[in-house]
Image (cartoon, rainbow, N blue to C red):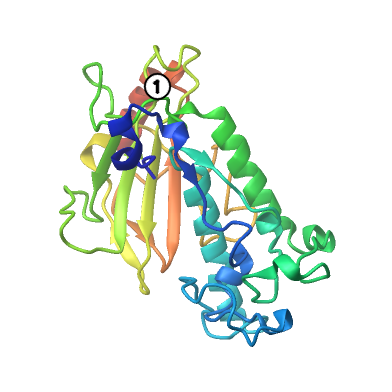
Amino acid sequence: MSGSSDLYQPGGRQPYHSINFITSHDGFTLNDLVSYTQKHNEDNHEGNRDGDNNNLSDNYGAEGPTRKKATEAIRLRQLKNFLATLMLSQGVPMLLYGDECRRTQRGNNNAYCQDNAISWFNWKLLEKNPDLFRFTKALIAFRRGNPTVRRIDFLKGQTNRPGALPDVSWFTAEGGPVDWTKPDGSLICIFGAPDADEDPKREGRHVMFFIHSGNLPRQFAIPEIAKPILWRKFLDTSANTPEDIYPDGDGPVMPTKGPIVLGDHTLVCYVSASQKIQPALAATATRLRQN
């Protein structure tokens, strides 16, 4: 999410030197990544020996296409999780064509030799999966319009002026500091909007992620540094269309009291308004909490 500074910063390079991707032309498509636990390259006539065996994939209850509603629901949620993580991370996102509408190679992860329906683009998928296509378009538009998720310099966890949010902050689900030595499938991340020198038009919006990869619901506490800000929901990967994403970042206001509950395998993202009107929003947020 933060642009691989461990790899690129020592050499004097910038976040845009980090090319981020979930899938590429080699390997599974995104749809197949959540639909197959094993490669299915039989059509390549090499005894299924070609292609990588380490796909880091899961079928969530059925190998390949299925009519199981529960399996399809978690697959779709994971597709949205992957797309959201890709498009909202620092660095340059690389999207494999067709992932925005569930293009499949039927489990084939080495389809270079298939000049047929296995590797072709089926344009009917855009009509079959308009909701995921809408979700992806909204993510891309948000990224293009918000410099907070495409910083010029690597994140430092610091702020350049008093009272501003750090460029990045990490918290546990309980809202406290993260112990990176302990594994945990839940995390809160806040990207603070850039300052005027990096964002002269002041178009940046703070972005806060609630990330939960566990199999059961979990409560998240709002970090103290986020409470003075009025946040609106941008996306919720567990929700159905159109509540899964609000293209203008004008979704419901984040609850001011009590924890936020995330279902299993869910990413929820909130955004602030433009920095041009943050002081007014902060005052509004304070009044809401006092009432």
Q: Is residue 127 left or right of residue 47?
A: right
Q: Residue at x 15, y 58 (%)?
A: 181
Residue 70 occupies which quadrant of the picture?
A: bottom right
Q: Report the quarter where the C terminus lies.
A: top left
Q: Is residue 223 left or right of residue 7?
A: left
**Residue 60 vs residue 109, the one in the foreground:** 109
**Residue 197: horizontal and vertical position, in percent?**
39, 12
Secondary-structure class at tag 1: helix
Is residue 33 positioned above or below 200 on the image?
below
Provide the residue designation for mark 1.
Answer: 278
Towards the viewer: 224 or 280: 224
Closer-to-camera residue (25/15)? 25
Residue 76 in view, yes or no: yes
Q: Is residue 235 visible?
A: no
Disc 1: CA contacts within 10 A as few (<14), some (14-19) or many (>=20): some
The total number of labels drawn is 1
Is 123 above or below relative to 175?
below
Q: Quadrant of the N terminus?
A: top left
